[in-house]
Structure formats: structure tokens, C-alpha cells
Amino acid sequence: MITATGLDEIRALAGKDLGHSAWLDITQDRVNTFADATDDHQWIHTDPEKAKDGPFGAAIAHGYLTLSLVIPLFNDLLGIQGTKMSINYGLEKVRFPSPVKVGARIRLAGKVAEVTDVPGDGVQMVCDFAVEIDGEAKPACVARAVYRHYA
């Protein structure tokens, strides 16, 4: 894990490859819990028996579940200290090139694309992420996330 303390160290991250997080198992229990939280109980996610005959041959994680896991996986890559406040400012392009089958392992690859100053004694950090699936050529999710950090 990389740690940045204060705005100057965050600025210095521009262009830096953050590496990879640890692997995370995608279990049916995790998928079902997400389905309960979002009221999205589509059979492709929550009915493993029916999903065996579906287009992917198994139950798959929700795309938004995969995207939401960027948060804890990103915490494996970068720690920010010495700021008053850090916020998720938004997402730019998000795509789901490959489904995550239940039972698969995923990890996050990240890079700080750019860091710019913003009003209010802060910086905006833009990160490019790819959620990789163990043994698969295509990522599960690619996204550009925008964070703001204030001194």
C-alpha cells in the first residue's frame, strides 16, 4: 500500500501506478446480500441453479456490486492521511466488459491519472481502475473515479 500525507504528497502521485490489491472472493452470499440491499433479485444473480442454464453458465455478480467493491479494494492500494476531508466526487466512464461469475476472485489495478488543484484548499485526484478477474483476459469493470481531498 502507498500512503500519501497531505496535499503535496497527493499531488506527487500524478501518473503513478498504484499496483494491485489483494484478491477478493465473490461468493453467492455476497451477491445475495447485495441483491437484498438493492432490491435487485434477478435470477441471473440469485438463482444459481437456473443461472447454470443461462447465458453465462453460472450466477454472476451484479455489475454495480463489482463497481462498489472498488471502494474496499482501493483501500488496499492507497491510504490518504493529513487531510481534513476526502470525498468521492464521482465517476466518469464506467464499463463492464466481462461478468464476474460467483466463485471467481477479483482484484483492483489502479493508476492516478492526474491531480489538479481545486478551490477551497483542495486537490482533485482522478484514478483509472480495472477490476480484474483471476484467470480471465478481460476485466470485469473499468472506471475512472474522481476524488477530492481538502487540507
Image (spheres, rainbow, N blue to C red):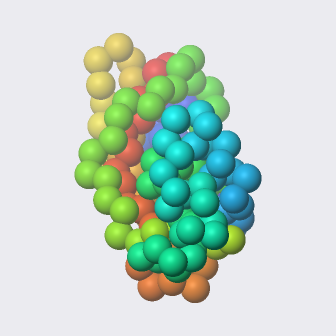
118 lies above or below 29:
above
Percent x, y of residue 113: 34, 54
The image quadrant that residue 89 belongs to is top left
* Residue at 62%, 27% in the rendered image: 82
Residue that extends furthest to the top in the rendered view of this protein? 120
* Residue at 35%, 69% in the rendered image: 97
Compared across the picture, whether 19 is left or right of 92 comes to: right
Compared across the picture, whether 110 is left or right of 94 comes to: right
Percent x, y of residue 119: 29, 18
- Screen quadrant of the N terminus: bottom right
Compared across the picture, whether 64 is left or right of 25 comes to: left
The image quadrant that residue 104 belongs to is bottom right
Percent x, y of residue 14: 39, 51
* Residue at 54%, 69% in the rendered image: 51
- In this rendering, the count of numbered labels is 0
Kindly tell me whether residue 115 is visible in this rendering.
Answer: no
105 lies above or below 147:
below
Q: Judge by depth and name the residue closer to the eye, 23 or 109.
A: 23
Q: Judge by depth and name the residue closer to the eye, 61 or 75.
A: 61
Percent x, y of residue 108: 55, 62
Q: Judge by depth and name the residue closer to the eye, 30 or 44.
A: 44
Kindly tell me whether residue 117 is visible in this rendering.
Answer: yes
